[in-house]
């Protein structure tokens, strides 16, 4: 009867949003490592106003507009997909739908926020796996542009914006080249143009620093976009896409040279080899896609799966991300990357943190998002089983900023349509 009540309430609730929602009897994964059985969560005006044990907390049911009994289902903070082209591309094979790679080498002025497509069919398939926030990120060139943190629901890109222009993305030149593939492995060698490419980046940042400290005679859009990174009150990040050990060490030195306030490593395949340097520099890592092959012929075959555990042991702040082939549609697999990390050394709550609170801390939005705590935004979802397992990740409830969001997508609608037609359930 409780489950029936849950489903009956949705058709009206989606279109007539309520200000006071009460969730009862769920297994709560807070996102910060804590859990609570038979949890009770009160939501008022988009914020979490109450958390308690449903068995011991007295409540006045007349006070609440909507009461949803979860019957032991799992409650999670909305998962976060950093460094993603989700919303910037629809069909990878169709150039007209790829809006993430602009012409040019140094493009800090290119902004992903205004290109974000809330009507994307891909977005709704990702959202129904529990991913509710993404960092919409450009690609290409030495400096790709500026990313923005976006919700996976909204009326338009303005409505979907959580944080605009959170940082620029720098593609650090590769220090190695060559190598083979898994069937024909081959050693890599040093990139002879590495120092030249690195110097070009240094020169651009030097020029931007000089531009920001003086009143230029002529406006330059590229350098204007860089001004904020040399201001003490700036909270914007500089995301360095770097995976090799030499790259990571040079990024640390580069960040010190320009006194960058919030540098972040994106990729970080060799980050565990620079553990103490990264920890001392307080530079977090957005780890590369775990479902990958080893980068070097001497690496253990399961090294990519163990990277989160290795960084956890080193005391380096990290989160998971999914950059790679077909990354927009594969963003739905982000919870299962955390599941892989759990299988290779992390605890379940550490794995959940890697796609929720840790990601929000690195992006700078943890004050209101990333965990289910009183005073934070009610951005969460409910799953029948563990959200980290593709067999049991069955999302039955989504709440974004206190608003109920549909839990179906065009794929589930088609499934129901043809299942009903042929009577196959």
Image (tube, rainbow, N blue to C red):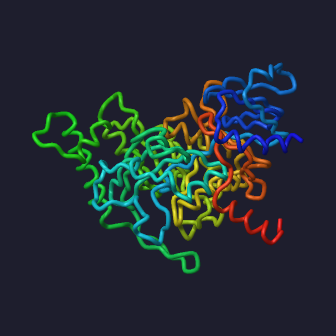
**Residue 11 horizontal/vertical position (percent):** 71, 44
Horizontal side, residue 50 vs residue 261: left or right: right
**Which picture quadrant has residue 213?**
top left
Horizontal side, residue 267 vs residue 109: left or right: right
Of all residues, the one furthest to the left in this rendering is 217
Number of numbered labels in the structure image: 0
**Which picture quadrant has residue 358?**
top right
Of all residues, the one furthest to the right in this rendering is 1
Residue 312 versus residue 333: which sits nearer the camera?
Answer: 333
Taking the spot 27% from the left edge, 49% from the top edge, the residue there is 202
**Residue 312 horizontal/vertical position (percent):** 62, 44
**Residue 264 horizontal/vertical position (percent):** 45, 44
**Residue 403 horizontal/vertical position (percent):** 62, 37
Taking the spot 45% from the left edge, 38% from the top edge, the residue there is 163
Taking the spot 20% from the left edge, 45% from the top edge, the residue there is 207
Residue 198 versus residue 219: which sits nearer the camera?
Answer: 219
User: Would you say residue 327 is visible in this rendering?
Assistant: yes
**Which picture quadrant has residue 258?**
top left
Check the picture and name the quadrant holding the N terminus. top right
Taking the spot 59% from the left edge, 64% from the top edge, the residue there is 292
Of all residues, the one furthest to the bottom in this rendering is 184
Check the picture and name the quadrant holding the C terminus. bottom right
Horizontal side, residue 28 vs residue 320: left or right: right
User: Would you say residue 354 is visible in this rendering?
Assistant: no
Residue 279 versus residue 370: which sits nearer the camera?
Answer: 370
């Amino acid at each position: 009867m409780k489950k029936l009540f849950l489903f009956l309430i949705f058709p009206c609730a989606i279109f007539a949003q309520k200000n006071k929602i009460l969730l009862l009897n769920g297994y709560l994964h807070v996102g910060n490592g804590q859990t609570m059985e038979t949890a009770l969560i009160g939501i008022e005006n988009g914020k979490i106003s109450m958390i308690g044990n449903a068995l011991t907390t007295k409540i006045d049911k007349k006070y609440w507009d909507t009461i949803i009994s979860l019957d032991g289902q799992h409650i999670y903070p909305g998962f976060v997909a950093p460094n993603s082209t989700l919303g910037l591309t629809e069909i990878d094979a169709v150039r007209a739908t790829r809006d993430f790679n602009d012409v040019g080498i140094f493009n800090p002025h290119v902004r992903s926020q205004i290109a974000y497509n809330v009507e994307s069919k891909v977005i709704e398939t990702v959202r129904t796996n529990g991913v509710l926030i993404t960092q919409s990120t450009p690609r290409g060139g030495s400096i790709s542009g500026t990313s923005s943190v976006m919700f996976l629901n909204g009326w338009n890109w303005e409505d979907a914006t959580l944080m605009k222009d959170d940082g620029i993305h720098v593609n650090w030149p590769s220090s190695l080249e060559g190598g083979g593939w898994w069937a024909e492995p081959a050693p890599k060698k040093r990139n002879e143009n590495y120092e030249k490419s690195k110097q070009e980046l240094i020169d651009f940042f030097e020029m931007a620093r000089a531009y920001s400290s003086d009143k230029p005679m002529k406006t330059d859009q590229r350098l204007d976009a860089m001004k904020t990174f040399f201001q003490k009150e700036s909270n914007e990040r500089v995301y360095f896409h770097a995976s090799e050990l030499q790259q990571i060490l040079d990024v640390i030195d580069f960040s010190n040279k320009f006194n960058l306030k919030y540098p972040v490593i994106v990729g970080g395949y060799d980050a565990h080899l620079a553990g103490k340097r990264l920890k001392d520099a307080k530079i977090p890592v957005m780890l590369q896609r775990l479902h990958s092959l080893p980068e070097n012929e001497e690496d253990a075959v399961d090294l990519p799966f163990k990277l989160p555990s290795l960084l956890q042991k080193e005391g380096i702040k990290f989160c998971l991300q999914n950059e790679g082939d077909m990354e927009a549609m594969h963003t739905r697999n982000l919870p299962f990357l955390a599941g892989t990390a759990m299988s290779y050394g992390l605890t379940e709550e550490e794995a959940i943190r890697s796609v929720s609170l840790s990601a929000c801390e690195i992006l700078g939005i943890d004050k209101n998002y990333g965990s289910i705590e009183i005073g934070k935004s009610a951005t969460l979802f409910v799953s029948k089983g563990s959200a980290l397992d593709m067999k049991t990740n069955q999302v039955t409830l989504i709440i974004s900023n206190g608003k109920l969001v549909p839990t179906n997508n065009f794929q589930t609608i088609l499934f129901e349509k043809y299942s009903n037609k042929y009577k196959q359930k």
